[in-house]
Image (cartoon, rainbow, N blue to C red):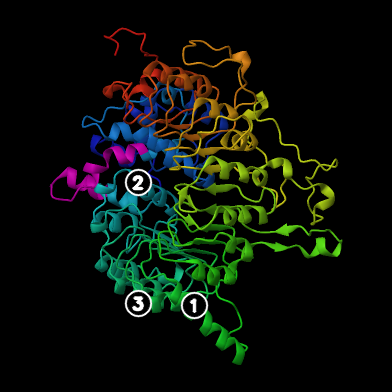
Amino acid sequence: MPPKRAGSRNSTNKISSGVGAKKRKVIKTKGRKAKGDVSDSSASNSEKEIETVKDYEDAVQKRILTSTTNRYEDFLEQDHLALAASFMMPSLSQPDGSHTSSPSSENRVFSLGTFCLYSIVKNFHHLAADATTAGRQQQQQRVFRRRIQHMPFYLSHKLFKYFKHVRPELLSSRVWTTLFFPANPSDNDHDVDHTMTELDLEGLIASQVTDSVIRSHIIHNLNLGPQLERINLSHLNGLSDKALAQLVASCTKLARLSLKGCTNVGDMTLANLPGETLLELNISFVSGPTSKGIQQMIRRCRDLVVLKMAGLMNLRDSLLLDLSSELNQKSLGSVDNTRTPLHQLQNLKVSSTKLGDRGLKVLLGFCGKTLRRLDISGTNVTRTVNISQYCVWADEKSKAKGVDPPMSKTMLEKVNLTRLKIATPQDLVAFFKALPPQCLHTLLMGYLTVGQVPLRDELVHSLCPFLDPATMPSKDDAIDSDDSDIQSSGKFDAPNPFSPEAFMPVRPISNHPRFRHLHTLSFFGNPQIGQSKRVNHSLRLLLKQVAPTLRRLELGYTRITSDVLMSLLPFEPLILHEADDVIAEDNMNVNMVLEELGLDETPLGSEAWAVLSQLRRLNRLSLANTRMEQEAVERVIQACTQITSLDLTSCRAIPIRKRRSLLQDVRQGRTKTDSDDDW
């Protein structure tokens, strides 16, 4: 229960009871209220007196456990984790505990929950230390631990999640089990939620999560297995196959399981998966499963919606062909085995495996008509036309209307073709030609080899007609009658993202599931694209087509130039030369859509500032190993006020000591024109 407002004035109990004489002056109320009854007028008065970070810290230490449930709704998850982390991490990294923040963070208003987390984490290293001392300090540590143990579950869960990502070294096996997973919660504390449906230990150090902890504490003492629905043990490579098998076997309601990076996962764990309830499974980068174990897992878990098997060494064509042959034989003699495995799979990731064309055909034969996301990067697949063969089909309604040729349908929205070696250019063109117009929102084609040569400008140009939003079908061609967003004129005009109204969130042209827009595009690692000098050709034309909706663009390790980047703007300026110091902004509008841009290892120079400074919504910009100078980068930072991540690694035109601090220096008003003393 929350601590009482009245109590001892002992300074050693200020954090746990919050009754310090000095701190009572921070928050004033008009009179004593009944428990839980605080008027709006008193709340407003208290808020007026909290104006600085120091005031908040004092108030939080007094009311550290008096917050109510409505302050911790699910939509504040980002506030607790991302916002609080950006505010707290600098102070945690300093030995003296002093807080350093940017000017923008000082003007930011944080929630009370954020400062509660801040106060706990700031004092956690001595409050939760092992009880080796005696006297009052030891008693204080016991009180603090009881307070954490008796916190409502929704609070302790958020606090535990924050510690995992910021200070995992403070959470020894004894600390995280006794504080956040107590074996004997107090029966007198009615606020404690004893129903735990999620076990998320990702972020802890592998040595802090052992087999004995899983067996003795999680399975036996707490008996969490029957109530767990989601388990995340990613990258905890200290757990054995046997311990994991015992855990998943006890979870009869398990729906989501992530064992990514648990290298000891093997056939025993896969054999004990609850196939009737499991919907999401991630066993990427584990080395234990054999071909037999993978086959058994596919047969057992038929209703999976998400399956990620990246990096599995034994995922080969042969095991999938044997599985397909076995299923075909069983389906001939028995009615009970006619249900196809993975018949409702929507997300398939088999990257960095030895999967080839024949094995991919088997998998797509299971889930082709339900698949939305496909990642085959780094595999032995050479024919992308097989994807369109199983994932694209003719619409029956258009056939009934006599449309010739009939409209095609697909559920695909994300395709990752990175590091593939496509057999011929014709195969790649045929794949995109078969896709319905604007069905993809994410397309990744990094390090792509086509016909034994890297991807070239000519092939990119041949793909432009199939990625052009202007090819959207008219209203008469639309099949489903529930598409209420289609324009009555039959045109699908995208809103102008370069207007001032573009500050609003980008809204798709249509909510129809088939009418999407490309918002993520990657050509990373294709060194032969971007060299074409022709207007409206290759990347110039493609970027101009997708710019109105593109939010993330990766062009690192290409031959991209400033002239090509201009295609991201509504129209090009009349003159843009490296010798020109100033270019009138009237000659070019701004792009208010693009948020992330990667330009690593490109031949860009300082002249690129004129284009980059017009991408006003950028929050991540990567310029590693480019030729941009310090003054040009400063202009970009000043124009793009939303940039929070800037990579200047190996930018030799910028002093080494400035590459990491340039963004912060410009935000604080220090530029190259300032004196050396200011630097």
Judged from this view, the residue extending furthest toward the bottom is 333
- The quadrant holding residue 292 is bottom left
Q: Mark 1 and mark 3 in contact (Cβ < 8 Å)? A: no
Residue wearing tag 2: 165
**Real-space Cα distance between discs 3 and 2?**
30 Å
Residue neighbourhood size for the residue with mark 2, other residues' Cα within 10 Å, grouped as few (<14), some (14–19), many (≥20): some
N-terminal of the two: label 2 or label 1?
A: 2
Residue wearing tag 3: 268
Q: Secondary structure at mark 1?
A: helix
Inspect the image, locate mark 2, and give the three-letter code of the amino acid beneath it. His
Residue 23 vs residue 43: left or right? left
Residue 397 vs residue 319: left or right? right
Tell me the residue at 24%/34% (across/down): 11
Task: Give, as a single range, the part of the protein colored magenta.
Answer: 118-143
Single out the mark in the foreground, 3 or 1: 1
Is residue 343 shown above or below 485? below
Residue 453: x and y, percent?
A: 46, 49
N-terminal of the two: label 3 or label 1?
A: 3
